[in-house]
Image (cartoon, helix red, strand yellow):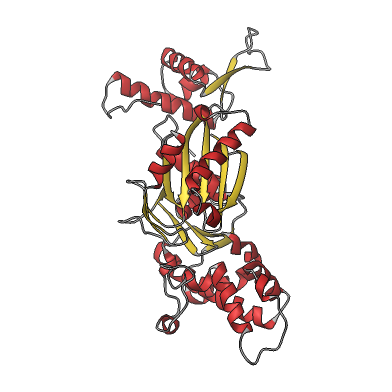
Amino acid sequence: MLMNLKKTSTPNYLKYLNKKKILRYVRENDERSRADIALALSISKPTVSSIVDELIEDGWIEEKDSLVASSSGGRKPVHLSFSPDSRLIAGVDIGGTYVEIGILNLNGTILAKDRFETQPALKNNIIRKVGDCILKLLGEINRTPEHVMAVGVGAPGITDTDKGTVLEAPSLGWIDYPLKEAVENELGLPVYIDNDVNVGVLGEQWKGKAKNADHLILITLGTGVGCGIIVNGSLYRGSSFAAGEIGYMVTDKNEANEEYDEIFEGYGFLDSHVGGPSIVKRMKKKLEEPDYHGTYDSENLSAKTIFQLAKDEDPIATEVIKETVDHIAYALVNVVCIFNPQCVILGGGISKSGGWFLPRVKEVLSRHLPLQTEISVTELENVSVIGAGALCLKEHESLLKSEGVM
């Protein structure tokens, strides 16, 4: 892509900055002329014209004849538009249950997507499966790896983004796994990795309810529970990349002092009390109690079916889900009082029932917090795939790398 340029006052670096400014302006202000750009950015017309020619040649922007003639009656002016399909991004979300993959353009539109089950793939070269899926999706839209600017990957565990290593991902059985290197070797493309919830919160900031929010929390409820944090407009990772690992949060000291089942080895207290597998396990345990005489298809229970049973006022399911919701609510009390976000968004599979249990969560927060924070459920489909694309735009050495570019 671009050569690395030192931040000096050299002509090359000044040109690079002007190039970024012009591309960003065209991206945010569609169908503007060269004269519009020069006036808006206070850059000389010859400089603008030269840089625009380069951006057109490189495919970043395209020219379109105006439908309206100039006010002087001369030829119609040429307008410039950002070309979102000039380059593509591959977004990969590796979850404990499914791996979801999408091909996005530079505006964050998913052009093709697919998914496959995680656990079987772990036994049969999951990275090759990811690579094959990306190539298949590119073929579906008649594109090749040469069109892909970068690959963003979210992983369900503590991730060292500097080294490109997943330090620990219990649901995958990974410890110090060199994910970045593995995917780069498979595809031969630049790869950027992060914790899956971190890429999710980037997706919400880019395309979701909290678009451009400076202080944002995303809580994901799925196989386990995770937390992505945006502070002052930027992703907060912590001193050792473990910020937001609220799965280890304790929301009941009495239960924490007792023996409890870890859903996966290495999972924390909250993971083991609100994750989908933990809901199923607690439901089955209650069904095995000697004073219970009902009939359930316990072999085919899932978190989704238990939530539905609770909605239908089944007493045992209601008890299980009430315990789950209380743990979620008290975890939120702790997170909100520490970070004071503008809003909290719930995501992940369990959040699909959020509209039903959200009133209980809000009731707990209003009782324990002096200031109220907006809490809602995500409406953004494929949030982590989109967030993986956002990660690429933030990290990749390209003209689009800029604070606030999204």
Identify the image quadrant of the N terminus. top left
In this image, 51 relative to 134: left or right? left
Q: Which image quadrant is residue 266 in?
A: bottom left
Toward the front, the furthest residue is 124
- The spot of residue 237 in percent (x, y) is 37, 54
Residue 404 visible in rendering: no
Which residue is rendered at x = 63% and y = 8% of the image? 75
Indicate whether 108 appears above or below 240: above
Toward the bottom, the furthest residue is 291
- The spot of residue 152 in percent (x, y) is 47, 42
- The spot of residue 129 in percent (x, y) is 53, 44
Which residue is rendered at x = 61% and y = 88% of the image? 289
Name the one closer to the observer, 201 or 196: 196
Residue 28 visible in rendering: yes
- The spot of residue 395 in percent (x, y) is 40, 39
Which residue is rendered at x = 41% and y = 69% of the image? 248
Indicate whether 62 appears above or below 306: above
